[in-house]
Amino acid sequence: MQQLFEDVFLLEGVINGRPLQLIYLQGESASLLLDTGCSGDPEGFISAQIREAGGNPAALRWIVNSHTDLDHTGGNYAMKQIAPQAILACGDADRAACSDPAVLYGVRYDAYRKNHGIFYDAAGRDWIMQQCGQHMPVDVTFTHGEHIRLADDWEIEIVALPGHAKGHIGLLDSKNSALYGGDAIHGAVYLGLDGTPKLPPTYLHVDDYLHTIDFIDHLPIETYVGCHWPVKRGIEIAAFCAESRDFVHYTDALVREALTREWLTLRELCLQLAPQLGGWEHVPALDLELAFALNGHLESLIKAGRLDVRQDETAQAFTLVMT
């Protein structure tokens, strides 16, 4: 557990060798937890570190999901058992998937099965569903611009940060000149606690993601806190935004170049571009994790009328429309 500011704490866990950092805000009139980790994390580290910070997990007023993902919503049910009076909230577009693990699995982890033949095996599915926890309906949803008062002199503003998820939100803490951004931007890689690459960027919606990068880059903040990256301060924020933006533009150029030469499926595109987009060649299974971002680029090109699409028995294939 780290104390970032007065009454602001970074709760520290682990997800598959990567850091998992959750924000706990301890106001005089209300306390707030941003994200709940995986299903076992409320008992595994969240409650203990809230107590270490001098708080009471059973007295939480707000539990807010920054977005829909198993390591951000999986502990919802368990946290509500600890703090049943707490208001569970998320971005409006993420309501169904934050509430229901079956919906989450379908729209996020199994989204590329039908059209692309990319999916997790039975063991992977079982692990994901276990980490997603139990069904827990969301109480309140946010869009952008709402405020939560934690003390007489302390309000948190909800800001929309879409791209990694349609309903992704963050907490703008003007009192401390900070943004608690969840997984809003990813740089060029998710690094593990050992410093090695563990996951490529997993944004889904390219235009939204670029808008969010620019939004964060122009905020008058001195601290940016994500869930899986070191805390960024001062000029590090602009550098992280630039790294995130550069990855998107580089990826888009690679996708366009690859699809000018031949028809490719999403799977083929992932395997072909992985050596140029990351340092995880020693873990081949991670190549297909590029499906999240690369499918976003394909959808953006389709929307712009730049791709031809054909479907065979197993998967869609794509090629660039020459103009």
Image: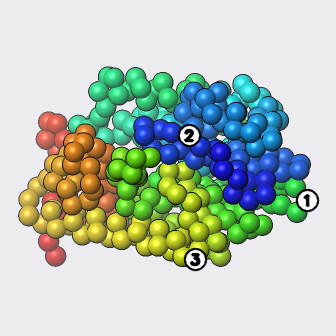
Mark 3 and mark 2 lie on one chain; the one further toward the N terminus is 2
Residue at 36%, 35% in the rendered image: 110
Label 1 – label 2 distance at C-alpha: 31 Å
Task: Identify the amino acid type marked 1.
Answer: Asp
Q: Is the C-beta separation of discs 1 and 3 under 8 Å?
A: no
Front residue of 285/47: it is 47
Quadrant assignment, res 153:
bottom right
Q: Which of the numbered marks, if any, corresponds to residue 13? A: 2
Q: Which of the numbered marks, if any, corresponds to residue 242? A: none
Residue bearing mark 1: 152
Residue at 36%, 71% in the rendered image: 246
Task: Identify the amino acid type marked 3.
Answer: His
Callout 1: helix, strand or loop?
loop
Res 307 seen here: no
Mark 1 and mark 2 lie on one chain; the one further toward the N terminus is 2
Residue at 24%, 69% in the rendered image: 253
Residue bearing mark 3: 218
Label 3 – label 2 distance at C-alpha: 30 Å
Task: Identify the amino acid type marked 2.
Answer: Gly
- Number of residues whose C-alpha sits closer than 10 Å to that of mark 1, classed few (under 14), some (14–19) or many (20 or more): few
Q: What is the x, y in percent for residue 205?
A: 41, 58
Q: What is the x, y in percent for residue 70?
A: 50, 36
Q: What is the x, y in percent for residue 107?
A: 43, 39
